[in-house]
Image: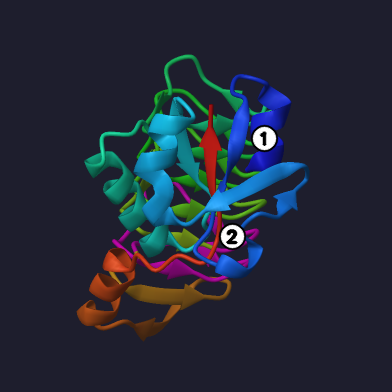
Amino acid sequence: VLDILLQTGRHEVAGFLDNNAEIHGRRIDGIPVLGALDDLSRLAAELDIAGVIIAIGDNGVRRGLARRVDAAGIDLLNAIHPSATLAHNATLGRNVVIAAGVVVCAHCQIGDSVILNTGCIVDHQTMIGEGSHVCPGVRIAGRVKVEPGTFIGIGATIIPKITLGCESIIGAGSVVLEDVPPLATVVGVPARRVKLAAASEDIAAIDALDATRALVIGG
């Protein structure tokens, strides 16, 4: 995420926040670790911060932290790599990370706190729900609905008009030919269900706020 922000040059990166006290005061690629998440409001005022972006891979934690930042009245920024290709009529939420080589086609809708990772393709009229992660090399065909919190593993393929249910997990390299229920894990070619998570697991993931990775603050 830091690399994307530096390459776009739209924001001066003031620093990181991380709940790991052992790295407070250190620098990562020359950028200081300023403190913990609880320091956010104070630092935002002191440093005249324009907004933040959350650099955490876990879908539930990222989504929960975004809501916490939003409740504090601090803007959530997007990080879009300059090599990404986005249709002029694609729409993006906030706290969205779009990595190098991503293609987002016409009339796609990308929700808040989504990660579109390196080289993935999201074809026309597809909807990606809040807090989902589309891993590198994923190919999503047209008119697919990806519900919130979905994780699509590296190199997976989703055929047109499929629905991936809330908090579902698509295994790496899978080929999805039919709808996936909420909370299900599917793997293989074609993809088959191997697990159905309990709702309590999903709720715990969404509400988790004890992050141990970085918040990148844009100034």
Which of the 4 image quadrants contains residue 201? bottom left
Q: Is residue 160 magenta?
A: yes
Dot 1 alpha-carbon crowd within 10 angstroms: few under 14, some 14 to 19, many 20 or more: some
Secondary element type, mark 1: helix
Q: Is residue 154 magenta?
A: yes
Point out the tag, 1 or 2, that comes first from the N-terminus: 1
At x 55%, y 61%, the residue is 213
The residues tagged by marks 1 and 2 sit, at their Cα atoms, a distance apart of 24 Å
Nearer to the camera, 83 or 66 = 66
Dominant SS of magenta comes to loop
Question: What kind of residue is marked 2?
Answer: Ala
What residue did someone put label 2 on? 156
At x 36%, y 31%, the residue is 75
Secondary element type, mark 2: loop
At x 40%, y 45%, the residue is 40
| Above or below, comparing residue 184 to residue 135 in the picture | below
What residue did someone put label 1 on? 4
Question: What kind of residue is marked 1?
Answer: Ile
Can you say which quadrant of the picture contains the N terminus? top right
Query: Percent x, y for residue 177?
Result: 45, 61
Query: Percent x, y for residue 142?
Result: 45, 38
Query: Percent x, y for residue 19?
Result: 49, 64
Tell me which segment is drawn in magenta: 153-179
Which of the 4 image quadrants contains residue 74? top left
Dot 2 alpha-carbon crowd within 10 angstroms: few under 14, some 14 to 19, many 20 or more: many
Tag 1 near tag 2, CB within 8 Å? no
State the residue lying farthest toward the right.
29
Which of the 4 image quadrants contains residue 167? bottom left
- Left of 204 or right of it: where is 155? right
| Above or below, comparing residue 4 to residue 64 in the picture | above
Select label 1 or label 2 by which is in front.
Answer: 1
